[in-house]
Image: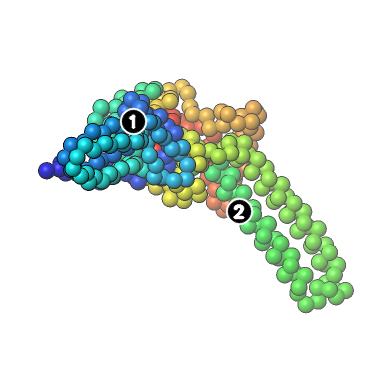
């Protein structure tokens, strides 16, 4: 009689971000080496001797999610008499099943308490944490990225307007020629200005967000703590992050920094960027200009935030999942 394994919805995870390198390293440590592939042999024989030689086999984390981790062996069999009839089945794991395995281990060993949803007393540097909240984009770069996209639309609109005016009846006649010639330099000047602003905003965002990475802010539903983490695009299921942003997920990782309520420090979102070297008046001027644009109704853009106030934690993420 076989034992029936049951799982709750809490145990069956769907990962939208999974750092497979960290996952395999942690599992190798927990299991004292990889022993996660099982080979099952069934059959009958009169009398036989067998030997198995095992060798480690690990596939590199790449495109395929099905892979072998652990012992693969060669089975030698000698028969003295009678007949032998046997079959072998090999159980392999996916990255998702390995994440479930790691999380079950952390919960069983009380290294993570999913019921606390990241209470302050659990925010000790180096500890595992499962943090729940709504995933938001970097509040600094998100504002400039939106402005950059808006300027792109404005450039297209000006170009279309210029073509429409050129195609209007009488545009090539003497009466309208002078007016069009006067209007064209003004349009070109505005297009150049929009292009320069778009390039400036792109330079700012690429300086703050390094290539292949994104900074996210996780806001707890009760409005207490915020979590800040940097993820690698290579480990995202959807690199556009459309299924991730502005939705509530759970984050499994390790605490790298804890700023409790009343801390004198803040999380600086520009700490590793080149723009951090400019005087604070420069950033204040940009922030005030964007706030003025939003207040006048010409653009609905949130003012870029350069810091996250406490209480907050910084997390090195392993996985983001439901």
Viewer can see residue 184: yes
Q: Is residue 179 above or below residue 259?
A: below
For marks 2 and 1, give the one nearer the viewer.
1
| Quadrant of residue 6 within the rendered picture | top left
Q: Is residue 292 above or below residue 36?
A: below
Few, some or many residues within 10 Å of mark 2 (<14, 14–19, 20+): some
The residue pinned by badge 1 equals: 53
Which structural element holds mark 1? Answer: strand
Q: What residue lies at 26% left-to-right and 33% top-to-bottom?
A: 50
Reading the chain from its start, which is encountered first: label 2 or label 1? Answer: 1
Residue 267 on image: x %, y %: 49, 29
Would residue 235 appear left or right of 146 to someone viewing this image?
Answer: left
Viewer-nearest residue: 290 or 27: 27
Few, some or many residues within 10 Å of mark 1 (<14, 14–19, 20+): few
Q: Quadrant of the N terminus?
A: top left
In the rendered image, the residue lying farthest to the left is: 1
The residue pinned by badge 2 equals: 150
Viewer-nearest residue: 175 or 251: 251
| Quadrant of residue 190 within the rendered picture | bottom right
Q: What residue lies at 63% left-to-right and 57% top-to-bottom?
A: 153
Q: Quadrant of the C terminus?
A: top left
Mark 2 to mark 1: distance in Å?
A: 64 Å
Residue 14 on image: x %, y %: 35, 46
Give the number of the disc on residue 287. none
Viewer can see residue 251: no
In the rendered image, the residue lying farthest to the right is: 174
Residue 207 on image: x %, y %: 62, 36
């Amino acid at each position: 009689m076989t034992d029936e394994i049951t799982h709750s919805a809490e145990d069956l995870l769907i990962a939208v971000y999974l750092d497979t390198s960290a996952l395999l390293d942690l599992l190798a440590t927990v299991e004292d080496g990889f022993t996660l592939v099982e080979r099952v042999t069934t059959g009958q024989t009169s009398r036989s001797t067998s030997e198995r030689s095992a060798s480690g086999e690990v596939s590199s984390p790449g495109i395929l999610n099905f892979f072998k981790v652990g012992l693969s062996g060669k089975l030698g069999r000698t028969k003295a008499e009678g007949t032998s009839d046997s079959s072998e089945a090999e159980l392999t794991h996916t990255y998702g099943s390995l994440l479930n395995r790691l999380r079950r281990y952390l919960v069983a060993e009380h290294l993570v308490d999913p019921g606390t949803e990241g209470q302050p007393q659990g925010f000790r540097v180096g500890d595992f944490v499962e943090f729940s909240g709504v995933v938001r984009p970097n509040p600094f770069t998100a504002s400039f990225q939106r402005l950059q996209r808006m300027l792109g639309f404005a450039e297209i609109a000006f170009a279309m307007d210029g073509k429409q005016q050129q195609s209007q009846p009488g545009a090539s006649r003497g009466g309208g020629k002078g007016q069009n010639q006067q209007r064209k330099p003004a349009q070109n000047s505005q297009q150049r200005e929009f292009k320069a602003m778009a390039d400036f905003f792109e330079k700012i965002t690429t300086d703050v967000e390094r290539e292949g990475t994104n900074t996210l802010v996780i806001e707890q539903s009760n409005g207490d703590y915020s979590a800040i983490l940097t993820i690698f695009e290579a480990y995202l299921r959807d690199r556009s992050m459309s299924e991730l942003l502005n939705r509530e997920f759970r984050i499994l990782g390790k605490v790298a920094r804890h700023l409790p309520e009343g801390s004198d420090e803040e999380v600086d979102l520009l700490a590793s960027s080149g723009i951090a070297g400019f005087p604070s008046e420069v950033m204040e001027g940009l922030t005030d200009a964007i706030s003025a644009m939003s207040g006048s109704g010409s653009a609905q853009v949130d003012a870029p935030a350069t810091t996250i106030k406490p209480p907050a934690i910084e997390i090195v993420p392993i996985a983001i999942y439901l």
